[in-house]
Amino acid sequence: MTVAVQIAEAMNQTQFHRGPDGGGVWHDEQAVLAHRRLAIIDLDGGAQPMANEDGTLHLVFNGEIYNHIQLRKRLIQAGHLFRTSCDTEVLLHLYEEKGDNFVQDLDGMFAFALWDATRQKLLLGRDRAGQKPLHYFLKNGTLVFASELAALHRHPEFPVGLSETAVADFLSLQYVPSPHTIYREVHKLPPATLMRFFPDSGRVEQEKYWQLDFSQKCNMTFPEAKERLREVVIKSVRKRLMSDVPLGVFLSGGVDSAIIAAVVAKLCAPEKVQLFTIGFDEGRYDERGQARATSDWLRCHGCGNVEHFVKSFPGNDFGEIQRLLGHFGEPFADASMLPTLLLSRFARQKVTVALSGDGADELFGGYDRYLAIRLRRLSILPEKWQRWFFRKMAECLPDTGERTLAGRLRRLCGMLATNRSHAYFSILDRCPPQLKHDLAGERLRESENASRIFDLPFTAKDQVEQCLEADFRLYLENDILPKVDRTSMAASLEVRNPFLDRELVEFAATLPLSFKLHGTRKKYILRETFADCLPPAVFSGRKRGFGVPIGQLLRNEWRDSAREVLFARKFYEDGWLSRPAVEQLWNDHQNGLHDYSYILFNIIILSLFPESVNCK
């Protein structure tokens, strides 16, 4: 066994949770491929790495191709012979038929690595939205890649130098934006991207093969668009019911997951559909009542045979944070990762695949911040006066947290007091410039402002719609999807997202903004289209979001553990952060003077990060 194979096997074992049903390693003189399998389709076949008939192609693949049956029929008609019924083999034959362009035909979520021995080329690729991850680094002429950063850590050449810019970005955004990672020389392959590596020359090429286009609008009437949207959503859900193992649905108290649950229940009837919900004891965060209303409504209105399982989030296991960070391999501070992990473990007791409602907010205008940006656009005050007036208003409002009326108004006034070019970023920024300046140690003093990543070449012409496009390309890609992938895969559960179907995403982008935001109503066309599938309380209810009461936890259950982490780590000694500034934040938060829960949680995650690398 060569050293390279031993390293690949060690890296592969690190990702055991992503595929507990099997594993394999293949190598030749130039390449080593390793894979862990979570068996969903063709349980007996489908082992990877997989080769074509003459052994010139070898493939490792993560994800699902929902149109693999149609592609298989087409390839058989073209003369290709198949040995399995799994979707992985379709990729090999499709590449033989079309070369690198084969990726254009794939409908699904995926990350893959394909070694072409004839051309001495390694081809890496990711799906259009970025549902499945792929990380890599290039060192001494060797390209090393893996689904998770934790696997890359097992390689002896892993470059450990941290990026000051990435740390600064993380403090503002709660994630490190793609294509970067927390490490200077380690990268994420962007969504909808192919990467070619030629080991003989060390040459690397990247090519974007798809981009969502908001510039072209349909000329449908609202009723016509509703009818079309209903067809596309049902079609998308039907594709994602493809499975040889038990399947369920994540159900929150919101519209998106309720729609998915209703469609699944109707399509699967009379078979039983299992729904899974996580709740909180703190009322502002708890959605169990709305979720129960949905499941009861589905039973009473003949929408299918549903069984609803509900679990409460305990919120007292601070140690779970460090264990979970090991799966991310870098700082990640969306606290809803904790209940998402618990929900995934809960569902995994009964199913291997779960459908989720993620993606609808970004496509159909589900966040309050879109209304806030539209309100700012309607302001008739001169820019200078507006900024002064709302800055004073923000200073007068108490900082009581985002889930309170005063907290929301304070955040709105803060946005209205910001210059137009940075207004949207100011809503999302967890560490505003003055606060970041106070917190920064020597290593962060010269870091770039994270607002630069929002300077995108937008396809959308409308300012509000540019915010939706930014969220699809930044927030969804870097926060929502990594959170769902890492937490679900930590529980060996596959999560599928019907709202991220290519046909549905492209159709949503063509809808006029007026179909999405109607007065103060968000996701208007989505709600109207599926009003007959939703109980009134859910149909008309206010969006809460899958949040966690971090502020209360830091003052109560997590207080002692959080304080120990904040003030016993070496990020101060190494010049990253100012300890006196962090102490001031901590004391002000504990005394109730301000709600600093988000930035404190970011710093806690940053402080835990070095120890979490080998803690899973």
Image (tube, rainbow, N blue to C red):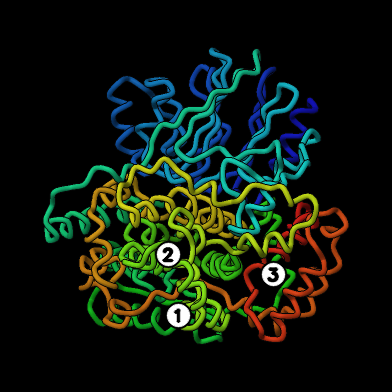
Residue at 76% in and 69% down: 582
Q: Position of residue 138 (x, y in %)?
A: 68, 29
Q: Determine whether the residue tagged by mark 1 lies in a helix, strand or loop.
A: loop
User: Residue tagged by mark 1?
Assistant: 287
Q: Nearer the viewer, mark 3 or mark 2?
A: 3
Image quadrant containing the C terminus:
bottom right
Q: Determine whether the residue tagged by mark 2 lies in a helix, strand or loop.
A: strand
User: Residue tagged by mark 2?
Assistant: 248
Q: Position of residue 535 (x, y in %)?
A: 28, 80
Q: Is the residue 50 above or below the residue 408 in the image?
A: above
Disc 3 to disc 1, how far (Cα)?
25 Å
Q: Position of residue 477 (x, y in %)?
A: 49, 50
Residue at 43% in and 57% down: 420
Quadrant location of residue 593? bottom right
10 Å neighbourhood of mark 3: few (<14), some, or many (≥20)? many
Tell me if I can see residue 275 in this picture.
Answer: yes
Give the residue type that dot 3 points to.
Leu
Disc 1 to disc 2, how far (Cα)?
18 Å
Q: Is the residue 63 above or below the residue 441 in the image?
A: above
User: Residue tagged by mark 3?
Assistant: 600
Image quadrant containing the N terminus:
top right
Q: Is the Cβ of the residue at disc 3 closer than 8 Å to that at disc 2?
A: no
Disc 3 to disc 2, how far (Cα)?
35 Å
